[in-house]
Image (tube, grey):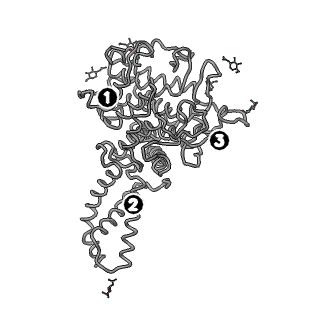
Amino acid sequence: MVLNYILTGSFFFLVLASQICSKDVADVGNRNAPDSLRLNPGFNIHKVVETSKKLPSRSWEFGTESEALLELYNPELSIHGNNPSGKDVYKPDQVKALVYAKEKIVIGTGANALSDDRKYANAAKDQVEYVYGGAPRWFNGAISHRVDHPALWADFIYMAPPYLAYCGVVENNATTLREAVDQISLYHDVLRMNVTTNATGVPPTNHKAVGKGSWEDIIDINPNASDSGLWSTGNGWAAAGAMRVLATVIKAPKNFTDGFRQDAITRVSSIIRDILDAAIRMPRADNNLLRNYLDDPSWFGEISGSSVLASTAVRLATFGQEIGLTPNEAYRYAEFAQNIRLTLGNGKHISASGTAFPAINPLDWNDRIEFTQGSPEDNAFIGLLFAAWRDCVQANTPGCWRYGTHHLRRSLFISYLFLLSLFTTNRSVDPEWVYAVYCYFYYVIRDRWEQNFEGIHY
Ligand SMILES: *[C@@H]1O[C@H](CO)[C@@H](O)[C@H](O)[C@H]1NC(C)=O
Ligand SMILES: *[C@@H]1O[C@H](CO)[C@@H](O)[C@H](O)[C@H]1NC(C)=O
Ligand SMILES: *[C@@H]1O[C@H](CO)[C@@H](O)[C@H](O)[C@H]1NC(C)=O
Ligand SMILES: *[C@@H]1O[C@H](CO)[C@@H](O)[C@H](O)[C@H]1NC(C)=O
Ligand SMILES: *[C@@H]1O[C@H](CO)[C@@H](O)[C@H](O)[C@H]1NC(C)=O
Ligand SMILES: *[C@@H]1O[C@H](CO)[C@@H](O)[C@H](O)[C@H]1NC(C)=O
């Protein structure tokens, strides 16, 4: 009788389950969230985002948060979306990222053009002029991260090149776009770690081959101000910034990038891949996160670098074939990111108020004390990771798995109850139980099919 019930209803329930289960997954923990935040990553993204707006107090933190809000609430306008050059007209108050940025921007001149009473567009142009023509440069032409003397920081790649690239496209100025691409190569030439020839070499000043491809943090004309460690967040700034430039080149009108498109895609994607490959190879800390200095086992695993590198890996996987990745390669990047996302969702890294931890002290990356009161970069990076993952799920990229761990555990539990009731009673089956077991089978079949149970830690 039971078997009969299940068999006859199977088609109907399978269809129903696929509908209801997907809807259900989307709602868990995020009932009051707007549609763009509804997918359940295994933690409360709505709280993380609300908290992330309150934490920043410095220019780059406001900038990163604005970018995160754009990718979260207006994915179509972000550089990873379908309409990045904004041909549609939006009112500023329709775009949360703009409302937020407008509250924070102080307009000045020259090096601080965007940091008193002129129009935003003019200030943006001034800023490009300064970065391109006014800022100090390194011997090889790399633009300095600092105004007073030449210094190259990996952080620069998230701050300036994506901006130059985007302004180049909207201003129809190919020179600016090419400059953005070249800056990534020039920085790479200087900051890419050299494998140590010193067998006793100890990180963070000396690096073994495992780190090949990753970047040192800071090279300054004053060696005392340099940081030769492979700073996890620094590598994240570099890879994520390069990723935005790559997306800009790919989305720019083809006739605009004539003659350098392919070369730019090849160069930038291989730099990003080198950094990600090194991060993937690195032994993780006990909490399954990347260490603050990637190759230095004396450091704790922290979430800033982990989440920003994961967000980059997801974006890369989503581009897939377009940048010459084989399906297996794309899968590997997506899987690395899933693993970090699930770690964030394991209940030990995001507080009930939406604060992520442990982070590195954002103003002192040598501070050995785990920072738990909320790092601005951190919460914004988790927003970037969520947005990248959501877009990846929507693009149906293999390896981008849609469920949170809560959901899997819940469906396992429900189906366990179902089986239990089946074996201990002989009443006819309640349709709810049938629904539960189908929901479960639906997950198992779908996920096995995508081979998504591999490499996932609970
Ligand atoms: C392109 O942008 C650069 C940097 O802002 C500027 O110096 C140059 O004059 C621009 N070229 C054109 C053709 O507008
Ligand atoms: C690696 O060596 C090259 C050549 O000596 C140098 O230009 C570069 O700055 C070095 N990179 C680092 C991170 O020290
Ligand atoms: C090798 O590295 C160790 C630790 O950084 C240092 O003490 C030592 O002097 C180095 N040896 C050489 C030959 O550079
Ligand atoms: C670097 O630090 C050393 C030791 O503290 C000091 O003697 C030297 O003058 C410093 N160099 C510069 C360029 O500040
Ligand atoms: C590219 O093509 C578009 C439409 O065909 C045209 O409006 C635009 O001016 C072209 N841009 C360049 C740089 O040739
Ligand atoms: C199970 O079915 C048998 C036979 O139909 C009946 O005698 C028995 O009472 C039922 N047990 C329960 C727990 O419903």
Name the residue located 51 percent from the left edge and 37 percent from the top edge.
Answer: 305
Instruction: Label 2: state its secondary structure.
Output: helix
- Vertical position of residue 218 compared to residue 386: above or below: above
Read off the residue under disc 1. Answer: 99
The amino acid on which the numbered mark 1 sits, given as a three-letter code, is: Val
**Mark 1 crowdedness (10 Å alpha carbons): few <14, some 14-19, many ≥20:** some
Marked residue nearer the N-terminal end (2 or 3):
3
Amino acid bearing label 3: Ser
Residue 446 against residue 390 in the figure, above or below: below
Q: Nearer the viewer, residue 151 or 169?
A: 151
Q: Earlier in the sequence, mark 1 or mark 2?
A: 1
State left or right for residue 336 relative to residue 26. Answer: right
Mark 2 surroundings within 10 Å by alpha-carbon count, few (fewer than 14), some (14 through 19), many (20 or more):
few
Q: Nearer the viewer, mark 1 or mark 2?
A: 1
Callout 3: helix, strand or loop?
loop
Q: Residue at x 61, y 27 (%)?
A: 227
Q: How far from the left and from the top, in percent, is residue 119?
A: 31, 16
Residues at circles 2 and 3 in contact by the CB criterion of under 8 Å: no
Q: Secondary structure at mark 1?
A: helix
**Mark 3 Cβ and ligand 3 under 8 Å apart:** no
Label 2 sits on residue: 410
Q: CA distance from mark 3 to mark 1?
A: 42 Å
| Earlier sequence position, callout 3 versus callout 1 | 1
Q: Which residue has dot 3 on it?
A: 298
In the image, what residue occupies the spot 41% across and 42% down? Answer: 48
Q: Tell me: is circle 2 under 8 Å from ligand 6.
A: no
Which kind of residue does numbered mark 2 sit on?
Arg
Judge from the rendering whether residue 204 lies leftward or rightward of residue 137; answer left or right. Answer: right
Choose between 269 and 425: the one closer to the eye: 425
- Decide: is 347 above or below 75: below
